[in-house]
Image (cartoon, grey):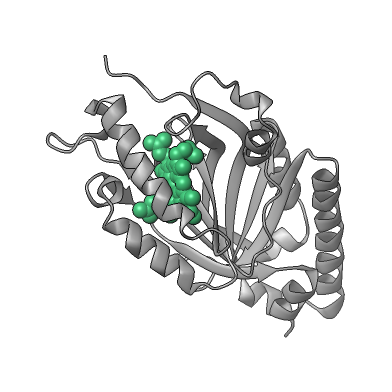
Amino acid sequence: MNEAASTLEGWYALHDFRSMNWTAWKAADDEERAVALDELQEFWNEWKNVEQASQGSTVVYTVIGQKADFVMMHLRETLEDLKAVENAFNKTTFAKYTTKAYSYVSVVELSNYLGKEGEDPMQNPEIVARLKPVLPQRQYICFYPMNKKRELNDNWYMLSMDERRSMMRSHGMIGRSYAGKVKQIITGSVGFDDWEWGVTLFADDALQFKKLVYEMRFDEVSARYGEFGSFYVGSLLNEGSLEEMLKL
Ligand code: VOV
C-alpha cells in the first residue's frame, strides 16, 4: 500500500451559511427586531469569551451573491462544542429570520509533506498555533471545498510520497509568495463532509484570492489533481456592520 501522509489535527471547524428571510424580517415589528438583535449581540459576546479563553474562535462574514447572506465560521475543541454553538444559534430569536443555506464540517489540518524529519511537531509552538488559530479579521473571506482526483490516469492517492511531496513543495512556494496578502486555513474533511478539504482564505484585498487561485491552477497539484466545489466570497461583519446590513 502507498504511504499515507500523516496529518496533525487541531480545532474542529463549522462553516455555517445562512440566508436572511427578508420577508419575515420586514414583517416583524420594531420590538421583535430589537429583541432579535439584542440576543444576537449576547451570542456574539459569548463567542468572544470563548476566543479569549483560547477554546475556539469565530468570525462572521457576509456572503455576496445568492448562495447565502452570511457565514459564521466557528472553530471549537470538539464536534460536540460545534453542535452546541449551532444549536444555540438556532434557538435565538434572530435565527427565526434566517434559513439554512449550506454548512461544512471539517478539522484544521496540517500534513507532514514539508515537515522537518525527526522533529516532534507538537513541541513547535508555531505549529500548535496553526492548529488552533485565532481566525483573522481580514476584510474578505473566500471558502471552497476541494478533492484530490482519483481517476485512472490521475490518481493522487496512487502517487508515491516523494512525488506528492515534490508537488506540495511547489504548491507551498506559490502560497508563500502571497505571505502577508492571503492567509489560508486548510481543514480536512475526509469522513466528515462531502469533499476532502475545506479551503478558507482571508485577505484585505479580495483580488488576491483570484490571483492566488488562478496561479495555483497552473501548478501541477491543482492543474492535474484538484477538483473544486462552489466558491463563497464575502466581507467581514462585526456587530455594527451586521446591524447596518439588517437596518430597514
Ligand atoms: C495562501 C497561501 C498558501 C500556502 C502558504 C499554502 C501552503 C501549503 C503547505 C506548505 C501545505 C503542506 C503542509 C500542510 O500545511 O498541510 C499545504 C497543504 C494544502 N493546501 Fe495549501 N497553501 C496555500 C493556499 C492554498 C490554496 C489556495 C489551496 C486550494 C488549492 C487551489 O488550487 O485552489 C490550498 C490547498 C491545500 C490543500 C488541500 C492542502 C492539503 C493537501 C494534502 O494532500 O494533504 N492551499 N498548503
Query: Where is residue 147 drawn, in percent x and y?
Result: 34, 42
At 23% across and 35% down in the image, what residue appears? 150
Image quadrant for the C terminus?
Answer: bottom right
For this view, does 3 lie left or right of residue 60? Answer: left
* Above or below 46: residue 53: above
Q: Is residue 66 visible?
A: no
Front-lying residue, 216 or 137? 216
* Above or below 26: residue 174: above
Query: Where is residue 59 drawn, in percent x and y?
Result: 69, 57
Please tell me in which quadrant of the rendered image residue 190 appears.
top left
At 49% across and 27% down in the image, what residue appears? 7
Count of numbered tags: 0
Query: Where is residue 86 drawn, in percent x and y?
Result: 68, 45
Residue that protrudes farthest toward the top in the picture = 1
Residue that protrudes farthest toward the left in the picture = 153
* Above or below 217: residue 108: above
Image quadrant for the N terminus?
Answer: top left
At 59% across and 60% down in the image, what residue appears? 18
For this view, does 212 lie left or right of residue 80? Answer: left
Please tell me in which quadrant of the rendered image residue 159 appears.
top left
Front-lying residue, 8 or 48? 8
Query: Where is residue 192 drawn, in percent x and y?
Result: 48, 33
At 77% across and 55% down in the image, what residue appears? 92
* Above or below 237: residue 121: above
For this view, does 165 lie left or right of residue 15? Answer: left
For this view, does 50 lie left or right of residue 62? Answer: right
